[in-house]
Image (spheres, grey):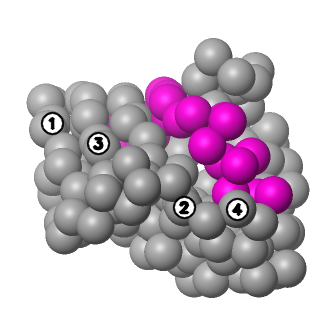
Amino acid sequence: MSSRFEQFKAVIESWKKKDIDAVINALSEDVVWHYAAAIAPPAKGKAEARAFIERFGAGIGEVKWRIFEYAETADRLFVEGVDEYVTKDGVSVAAPYAGVIEFSGDKISGWRDYVDRGVIDHMKAGNPYPEQVKELIARPAR
């Protein structure tokens, strides 16, 4: 079995290619995905996960999602990264985040991303990256 981080990197690469089927295939049937923990209700199951990905992905052009640090156990991966992308309208967004990904066998069964919606909305409105965001995302990716 590959490391949990390598499994998750494969999901990131699939998302960058907009290969929704590959992303969904990495999830368990009963996945619970808090794509914006504490902000929005989770997607439960593959059908809701696909609906979220299709809705969110429809407004995204280039994807530059990166992971800066991680730690893993047998069935859990902790990541710190940035979900950076350019919208189809040409607006750049960089959302620093922390995530917890749980595995059941080789499938992701739980996924919680913690982000600051205010920072995202600020950038989606066309404002420049705040200085603290620039500092956070300037680190090398893994």
Asked where in the image residue 47 lies, by quadrant, the reply is top right
Indicate the amino acid at tag 4.
Answer: Asn
Tag in front: 1 or 3? 3
Label 3 Cα neighbours within 10 Å, binned few <14 / some 14-19 / many ≥20:
many
Q: Which residue is mark 4?
A: 127
Residues at marks 1 and 3 touching, judged by CB atoms closer than 8 Å: no
Residue 115's label in the rendered image is: none
Residues at marks 1 and 4 touching, judged by CB atoms closer than 8 Å: no
Q: Secondary structure at mark 3?
A: strand
Q: CA distance from mark 2 to mark 3?
A: 22 Å
Q: Secondary structure at mark 4?
A: loop
Q: Which residue is mark 3?
A: 79
Q: CA distance from mark 2 to mark 4?
A: 7 Å
Indicate the amino acid at tag 3.
Answer: Val
If you read the primary sequence from the N terminus, does the residue marked by circle 2 or circle 1 appear first? 1
Indicate the amino acid at tag 2.
Answer: Tyr
Indicate the amino acid at tag 1.
Answer: Glu
Give me the residue at 29% from left, 42% from top. 79
Residue 72's label in the rendered image is: 1
- Highlighted range, magenta: 103-125
Label 4 Cα neighbours within 10 Å, binned few <14 / some 14-19 / many ≥20:
some
Q: Which residue is mark 2?
A: 129
Q: CA distance from mark 1 to mark 4?
A: 35 Å
Residue 69 sits above or below residue 101 on the image = below
Label 1 Cα neighbours within 10 Å, binned few <14 / some 14-19 / many ≥20:
some
Residues at marks 3 and 4 touching, judged by CB atoms closer than 8 Å: no
If you read the primary sequence from the N terminus, does the residue marked by circle 1 or circle 4 appear first? 1
Q: CA distance from mark 3 to mark 4?
A: 27 Å
